Image: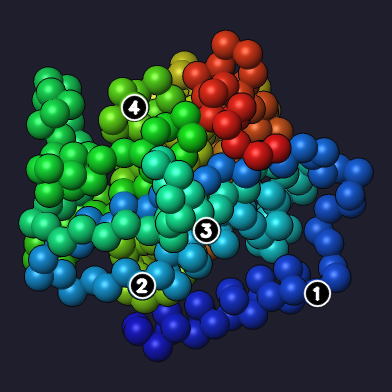
Amino acid sequence: MKVQIIIRIILIHFTFCLYSCGKEKTTPDEDRPKEILTIPVVVHVINYSPDPFTISDQKIRSQIEVLNLDFRKKNPDHLNTPAEFFNLVADVGIEFSLATIDPNGNATTGIIRTESNLTGIDGQDLTGTTAIEDLRLYFTEKGGQDAWPSDKYLNIWIADYSNRLGELTLPGYANPPGSDPRIDGVVIEPRVFGTLEPLALNHEYGRTATHEIGHWLNLRHIYAGEKNCNSSDLVEDTPTQYGSYTGHPTHPQESCGSHDMFMNFMDYVADDAMYMFTTGQKERMHALFQPGGLRRQLFLNSSH
Ligand SMILES: [Zn+2]
């Protein structure tokens, strides 16, 4: 199993390089957005101790690389998009870079590490009644780490989300636009982060962060409501879909009277089975940056 995973990682790196290291372009220049927004990222590594999952700086950087492929339509596997959806695949025009200046104006690597006994569940309000101050993951004095200002940075917390027996229970989650700034960001499990070991099966390509940052940028799941044709993801060019898909479905699959776009980053399929955002999703994300939008200030504070 392990050897298979390593071979797949080597293969995807080789494939990425074929496209991104050479001159070959997957989209003509005129289709590229003129203005690229670059969002500074701070990664808060909450290292559960004793923790078998070492999160190296390289693993973190490998995740940033994935984001900069997926949100720029530079991921070579977007070419797998079925013909009927191919014209909808969007270059979202957003890039991410590890912060170089901290909120106090000092130089930083954008990676902050804390040893504590907290796990991902310490950042999640499971009942809907937990006071923000009790979500310890987001507070340095409680064993987590304080968010950096969400009008200047994307906060990513990396925290084990397991039953402490090594079983992955949830890959990650997002606190969406409009969240209290103290928790605004995404939480990702170390074993689904980046493209370097340790990695969980079906989470080898860093797409959990792509998906969760999609939520952080206001996207809903492609299927909107589970087992429901009367719900909407509020995006016009994504077909209505009855429920989520997992694993590796084959196209076409049909529900609610149309073919399903399960290969969208906002479904639940395996990392190597999802590879596209649509133009409508791009527009919904960018609406956040317009005057009056919930991430307008982040836009104004970021380079573009
Ligand atoms: Zn989701």
- Residue hosting label 4: 181
- Residue hosting label 3: 64
Q: Quadrant of residue 77?
A: bottom right
Tell me, yes or no, whether the two marked residues, 3 and 4, touch with CB atoms within 8 Å. no
- Residue hosting label 1: 22
Mark 2 surroundings: few (<14), some (14-19) or many (≥20) residues within 10 A: few
Q: Earlier in the sequence, mark 3 or mark 2?
A: 2
Residue 269's spot in the image, x, y percent?
Answer: 45, 52
Disc 2 residue type (three-letter) = Ser
At a point 53% along the width and 29% down the height, the residue shown is 298
Residue 116's spot in the image, x, y percent?
Answer: 11, 57
- Residue hosting label 2: 56
The mark closer to the camera, 1 or 4, is 4
Disc 1 residue type (three-letter) = Gly
Q: Is residue 220 visible?
A: no
Q: Quadrant of the N terminus?
A: bottom left
Q: Earlier in the sequence, mark 1 or mark 4?
A: 1
Q: CA distance from mark 3 to mark 4?
A: 22 Å
At a point 12% along the width and 23% down the height, the residue shown is 131
Mark 4 surroundings: few (<14), some (14-19) or many (≥20) residues within 10 A: some
Which residue occupies the foreground of this view, 83 or 1? 1
Tell me, yes or no, whether the two marked residues, 1 and 2, touch with CB atoms within 8 Å. no
Which residue occupies the foreground of this view, 46 or 232? 46
At a point 18% along the width and 74% down the height, the residue shown is 52
The mark closer to the camera, 1 or 3, is 3
| 57 sits left or right of 190 in the view | right
Q: CA distance from mark 3 to mark 2?
A: 13 Å
The mark closer to the camera, 3 or 4, is 4
Residue 220's spot in the image, x, y percent?
Answer: 47, 29
Q: CA distance from mark 1 to mark 2?
A: 27 Å
